[in-house]
Image (spheres, rainbow, N blue to C red):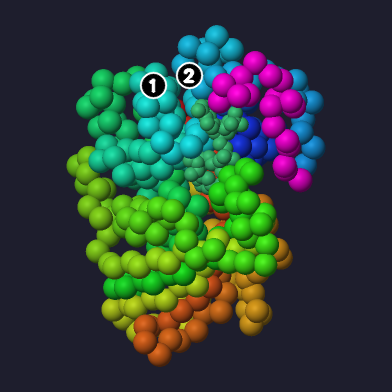
């Protein structure tokens, strides 16, 4: 990679935007050029626009950068960019990402375009061939750029663990989530709602999990995705944890592999990012822990720089074939880290 790509971050002041900034520091291929957010932040220096919530220091260069409005004219006035990362709220992302997509490659963390027929929904380890759908999109829409999306945070970690199970014939999956507070953005859930409590409802989350996983694990054929053919039922809960979603998963398979064979399938799973050695790729997409009380969000979410999915408690189930727990860092693998890994895939294929 000779020249670094200059990037704009839309939604740069939010929970995901801050992770983008943190992860793009010293990135070998990308360099932050423009920071955009709402008109509440526009015109301010980044340091004054939002409280910095990351564990690492806010870099001085970023702190002094101006925040601009998230529209094409304002971003272009602030700097020349090659590609765009979007972590805008879902409803707003729909028109704004289309504005940018007409001109630039847009890597979106928002839900707005995920299920569009001509928009890829990517997890680089699972469906790297789906990126070719942007060519169909460019033809259909007459765009120079494109929109490509990543799944919802709770879907990403689940889908990564389901992919190696497909060799055994996936029939039915039931999942119950325990989702972290940062998944609701900043300031997110009110403290008086969540302290000493669990909230058994996250708006739209179950529907996203039940549809997105089938598209990601589906087959790409002549411009279309044929959804994967298994049933998925999700039940989503918000818990009092800062980062890291924990999921309890029950799976019915066509075959009857041993627990050792299932564990081996998880451990051996590798994808295109590992083969290409993309900068943000974890060495192991799935890490299996054997302690009877792991994975736990506080202890395990940062394994593989927060890009690995941690599996534990693989065991037989009296109703389904087997069950397990999985944990993923929702703002790293589930959001900004996943978005950057997708962008690395497109760049490595000469498509961005
Ligand atoms: P957040 O903390 O609420 O941040 C929202 C960002 O969007 C802020 O930068 C905000 O700017 C900006 N924004 C809000 N209204 C705007 C407007 N009218 N015009 C332009 N910018 C506006 O939310 P988040 O958690 O980072 O989530 C961002 C997106 O990523 C959402 O679509 C979410 O569903 C998705 N996502 C989140 C996670 C996660 O774990 N949090 C994971 C996967 C996907 P101001 O500061 O100026 O208001």
The residue sitting at the top extreme is 77
Q: Is mark 2 within 8 Å of ligand 1?
A: no
Left or right of 26 on screen, residue 33: left
Residue at image coords 34%, 60%: 210
How many numbered discs? 2
Of 276 and 35, nearer the camera is 35
Q: Residue 341, percent across and down?
A: 52, 42
Q: Main secondary structure of the magenta part?
A: loop
Q: Which mark is residue 33?
A: none
CA gap, disc 2 and disc 1: 8 Å
In the picture of the structure, the residue carrying the numbered disc 2 is: 71
Label 1: how many Cα within 10 Å (few below 14, some 14–19, many 20+): some
Q: Is residue 316 visible?
A: yes
Residue at image coords 40%, 59%: 206
Of 196 and 343, nearer the camera is 196
Instruction: Quadrant for residue 126, please give it.
Output: bottom left
* 146 over 222 or under it: above or below: above
Q: Quadrant of the N terminus?
A: top right
In the picture of the structure, the residue carrying the numbered disc 1 is: 99
Quadrant location, ligand no. 1: top right
Q: Is mark 1 within 8 Å of ligand 1?
A: no
Q: Residue 36, percent across and down?
A: 57, 24
Of 258 and 154, nearer the camera is 154
Residue at image coords 76%, 45%: 55
Span highlighted in magenta in the image = 38-55
* 347 over 61 or under it: above or below: below
Q: Earlier in the sequence, mark 2 or mark 1?
A: 2
Q: Residue 47, percent across and down?
A: 75, 27
Q: Quadrant of the C terminus?
A: top left
């Amino acid at each position: 990679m000779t020249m670094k790509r200059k990037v704009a971050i839309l939604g740069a002041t939010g929970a995901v935007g801050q992770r983008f900034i943190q992860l793009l520091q010293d990135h070998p291929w990308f360099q932050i050029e423009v920071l955009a957010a709402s008109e509440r932040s526009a015109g301010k220096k980044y340091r004054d626009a939002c409280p910095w919530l990351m564990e690492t220091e806010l870099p001085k260069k970023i702190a002094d950068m101006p925040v601009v409005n998230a529209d094409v004219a304002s971003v272009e006035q602030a700097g020349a960019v090659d590609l765009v990362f979007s972590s805008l709220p879902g409803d707003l992302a729909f028109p704004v990402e289309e504005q940018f997509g007409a001109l630039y490659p847009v890597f979106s963390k928002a839900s707005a375009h995920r299920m569009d027929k001509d928009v890829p929904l990517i997890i680089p380890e699972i469906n790297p061939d789906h990126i070719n759908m942007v060519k169909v999109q460019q033809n259909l829409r007459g765009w120079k750029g494109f929109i490509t999306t990543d799944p919802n945070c709770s879907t990403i970690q689940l889908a990564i663990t389901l992919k190696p199970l497909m060799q055994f014939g996936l029939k039915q999956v039931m999942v119950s989530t325990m989702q972290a507070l940062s998944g609701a953005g900043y300031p997110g859930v009110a403290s008086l709602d969540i302290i000493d409590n669990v909230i058994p409802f996250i708006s739209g989350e179950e529907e996203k999990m039940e549809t997105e996983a089938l598209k990601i694990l589906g087959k790409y054929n002549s411009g279309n995705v044929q959804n994967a053919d298994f049933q998925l039922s999700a039940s989503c809960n918000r818990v009092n944890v800062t980062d890291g979603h924990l999921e309890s998963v029950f799976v019915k398979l066509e075959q009857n592999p041993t627990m050792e064979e299932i564990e081996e399938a998880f451990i051996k799973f590798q994808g295109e990012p590992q083969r290409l050695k993309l900068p943000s790729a974890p060495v192991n997409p799935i890490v299996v822990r054997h302690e009877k009380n792991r994975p736990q969000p506080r202890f395990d979410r940062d394994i593989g720089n927060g890009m690995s999915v941690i599996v534990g408690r693989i065991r037989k189930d009296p109703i389904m074939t087997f069950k397990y727990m999985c944990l993923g860092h929702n703002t790293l693998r589930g959001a900004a880290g996943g978005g950057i890994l997708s962008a690395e895939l497109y760049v490595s294929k000469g498509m961005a």
